[in-house]
Amino acid sequence: MDLNLEYIGIMAAILTTSGFVPQVYKTLKTREVKGISLSMYLVLFVGMVFWLIYGIKINSFSIILANIVSGLLVLMQIIAKIIYSKREG
């Protein structure tokens, strides 16, 4: 695989993955999940699993990295939504 393309992919992975950090941080800090759509995050997570499989199949480090890290952040958001929704009643 072209190394220059992987560098572009790594930059894209860093930028798109970092977009999830503020929301996860805010959710964990405030424990407020009322405005968060569980169905959207579930669909997003499943899509990331498929992207991860695709990245593994084509041996793309940037796709693998982005979807592992993003998937973990999205999974944290899903878990927080489930736990904190019970508390909000």
Image: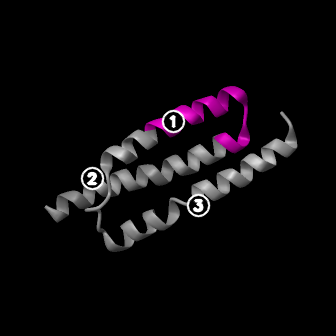
Mark earlier in primary sequence (1, 2): 1
Whether 15 is among the magenta residues is no
Q: For the point 29% across and 68% down, which residue is it?
A: 32
Tell me the element at label 2.
helix
Q: Is residue 73 left or right of residue 9?
A: left
Residue 16: percent from the left, percent from the top? 60, 54
Could you say where residue 9 lies in the image, as x and y percent from the top left?
73, 46
Query: What residue is drawn where x is 50% and y is 46%?
Result: 71
Q: SS at mark 1?
A: helix
Q: Position of residue 14 (x, y in %)?
A: 66, 56
Q: Is residue 3 left or right of residue 16?
A: right
Residue 29 badge: none
Q: CA distance from mark 3 to mark 1?
A: 18 Å
* 55 is within the stretch colored magenta: yes
3 or 1: tag closer to the N-terminus: 3
Q: Residue type at mark 3?
A: Ser
- Within 10 Å of disc 3 (Cα), the crowding (few <14, some 14-19, many 20+) is some
Tell me how far mark 2 sits from mark 3, CA to CA: 23 Å
Where is mark 3, residue-wise?
18
The amino acid on which the numbered mark 2 sits, given as a three-letter code, is: Ile
- Which residue bears the numbered disc 1? 49
Quarter occupied by residue 36: bottom left
Q: Secondary structure at mark 3?
A: helix
Magenta-colored span: 46-63
Q: Is the N terminus in the top left, top right, bottom left or bottom right quadrant?
A: top right
Residue 76 placement, left or right of 3: left
Q: Which residue is labeled 2 in the image? A: 82
